[in-house]
Amino acid sequence: MPEAGQATHKGQQTREEILRAALGFACTVGLDGMSIGALAEKTGLSKSGLYAHFESKEALQCAVLDTAADMFTDLVLRPAIQEPRGLPRIERLFDLWVDWKDETFGGGCPIIAAATDFDDRPGAIHDKVKYYIDEMIGVIARAAEIAVEEGHFDKGLDIRQFAYEFWGLLLAQQHYHRLLQHGDANLLAKRAFDSLVERAAHPSSLS
Amino acid sequence: MPEAGQATHKGQQTREEILRAALGFACTVGLDGMSIGALAEKTGLSKSGLYAHFESKEALQCAVLDTAADMFTDLVLRPAIQEPRGLPRIERLFDLWVDWKDETFGGGCPIIAAATDFDDRPGAIHDKVKYYIDEMIGVIARAAEIAVEEGHFDKGLDIRQFAYEFWGLLLAQQHYHRLLQHGDANLLAKRAFDSLVERAAHPSSLS
């Protein structure tokens, strides 16, 4: 059976190469703009060779979102969770979140980009994007809950409101940094974050 | 010359019909997903008939963004500016901004959708999206400056920070409302807005 094993291994390698190339396209032209023709050219495969690995363009687009989510887990979640529970973990989460997209993709996060593109279009991609964004906001909410448990945030904190405002300041950072190219995008995001944390910790006094 | 005048009038009408249909596509499948073939079918024109009105797909995409921006001016800016200077005007701006997209487009704002799609892609569409988003954030900043002049906001207010956080809470509302379909999206946005305004008015006490 070694030959079958080698074939599977080779198939897995090719699949990963296709995904890497597809992620590159998704980060620049978006999931929708990614063309099977361009992807075939980039990977040196025929279109039917590509379809041997992903049964449809939609299946490939979904796999690209899964890949981006895995990278988010490896590069943001896992390192953040090494920090002590509560405020240190939330601070690390914020720092990593602001930086990971540029370093990883050299373009915007394909999940965020797909959020506005697919919010009106029922289907597998819509469902997957919704799932991952719900999960990411859930990560923020759980981190805030832990900070309440640790006594770093006020017991009366509205966790849902905290997560909403955290999400908003991350989205604005992407606009200011990537589209508007404002050099102080990260500083603005950091100040918004510090104010949010200060209010969560001391609801009756202000930063 | 009446015949030439009629021809021009007819040409203008056709152009507006094309733009209306194109805006419909842009709101659902995005500026990029909009296909000239589907647009020709929708308007009953041939592809070459379409190109008689817009010299390229890019020119049409830019015209769609201009149309959306004109609608924003008519439906958000003009009514908001009817309010007294300062806080009442900012409050009206927020209320209209949260609502106008659904009522107007029945889909997301094509300018916001294009922001993440085109942030990496140099060209006329990128420049136009950047211009309009800069303008929209500028509207928030000017409204905040006026509120400072009127004594509604603190003299030491960081206008740029205020506009950043305002922008973030608008972007998060779009995710929560449209993609995640959370019924309390507008309530979360309103609470974030109220907190922002309270801090702008009274930097040393909290809402």
Image (cartoon, coloured by chain):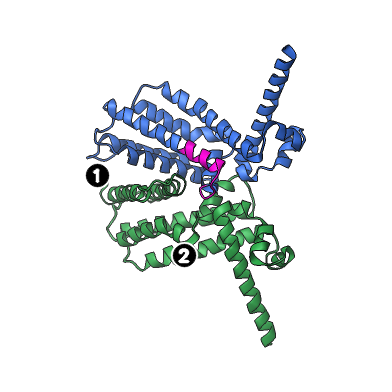
Chain colours: A blue, B green
The residue nearer to you, when weighing B138 against A167, is: A167
Quarter of the rendering containing residue A125: top right
Overall secondary structure of the magenta section: helix
In this rendering, position of residue A80 left or right of residue A34: left
Instruction: Count numbered badges in the picture.
Output: 2
* Residue at (44% x, 32% y) in the render: A95
In this rendering, position of residue B107 left or right of residue A38: left
Tell me the SS state at disc 2: helix
* Residue at (57% x, 60% y) in the render: B23
Tell me the SS state at disc 1: loop
Query: What x and y, as percent, mark residue B177?
Result: 42, 49
Residue A129 magenta-drawn? yes
Amino acid type, callout 2: Thr
- A51 in relation to B181, above or below: above
| Chain-order first, disc 2 or disc 1 | 2
Read off the residue under disc 1. Answer: B206
- B57 in relation to A160, above or below: below
**Residue A201: which disc?**
none
**Looking at the image, is mark 2 or mark 1 nearer the viewer?**
2
Residue A180 seen in render: no
Residue B189 seen in render: yes
Query: What x and y, as percent, mark residue A114?
Result: 55, 43
Dot 1: chain letter: B
In this rendering, position of residue B131 left or right of residue B7: left
Residue A131 magenta-drawn? yes
Q: Which residues are magenta?
A: A119-133
Amino acid type, callout 1: Leu
Read off the residue under disc 2. Answer: B73
Quarter of the N terminus of chain B within the rendering: bottom right
Q: Residue furthest bottom?
A: B1
Query: What x and y, as percent, mark residue B83?
Result: 33, 66
